[in-house]
Image (cartoon, rainbow, N blue to C red):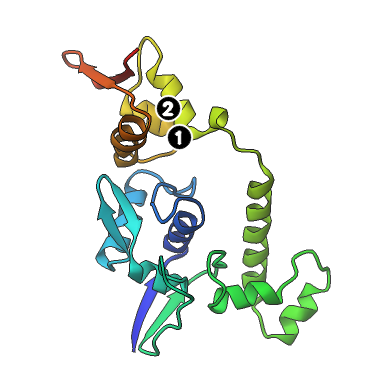
Amino acid sequence: MTTIQLTATQTLVLQHALDHNNGRIDWFPESVKGGARKKVLDGLINRALITPSGNDWMVAAEGYDALGCARPGAGAITPEPQIVATVIELTPCESATTGASQVLADEIDCQDPSNQEIAASNDIDPEIEAAVCAIEDAARAQAKAPRTRENSKQATVISMLKRTEGATIAQICEATSWQAHTVRGTFAGAFKKKLGMTITSDKAQGGVRTYRAAA
């Protein structure tokens, strides 16, 4: 039997990509920075759970399988018996209607004070129950939060590029929590191809490269 072992961080990164970015990897927990992010990416790459797409990394078909999610363009999957995804900390798969994590989420009513009795009757670990409830609460809160073009990360980057002094990749990464390759991919994709923006750059001697949006 082949076992795909995911750390809690790898699971959260993959799940966030599926739930919020159509499979594109551009988010990491706040506590995971610098070299730790590279280690997470390397671990996903080595297991073939993500695949390159231009300047971005996308969740591969094997990544969908590891989370028990339906692959793009396919119905709900039934994992083959030879492949079992083992997750250190269980998180629900909101984008699929099947899989152990979704079943667990369906069995727990986070608003019901009697859910401890439900967990006991179904032999559910209280720590797993708490994790599922916390993630569901966060998802509900995020769904209620208004998101407009004015307060999006892309709008923040555009505003920075329109400044007289422009912005460096490092400054944009700090403002958005994006990785450098995501910033460059956004320049080439969303800004240049979709919005038709012209982005220029220059580098002072001994300095770092600065990017600006042409008027």
Q: What residue is drawn where x is 52% and y is 33%?
A: 152
Tag 2: Cα neighbours inside 10 Å, few (<14), some, or many (≥20)? many
Q: Quadrant of residue 119?
A: bottom right
Where residue 160 appears, as percent x and y from the top left, is 42, 20
Q: What residue is drawn where x is 40% and y is 16%?
A: 162
Q: Quadrant of residue 169?
A: top left
Q: Which mark is residue 157?
A: 2
| Spatial CA span between label 1 and label 2 | 8 Å
Badge 1 is on which residue? 176
Q: Is residue 170 above or below residue 102?
A: above
Q: Quadrant of residue 134?
A: bottom right
Q: Is the Cβ of the residue at disc 1 closer than 8 Å to that at disc 2?
A: yes
Q: What residue is drawn where x is 34% and y is 56%?
A: 58
Where residue 150 appears, as percent x and y from the top left, is 55, 27
Residue 41 visible (yes or no): yes
- The image quadrant where one finds the C terminus is top left
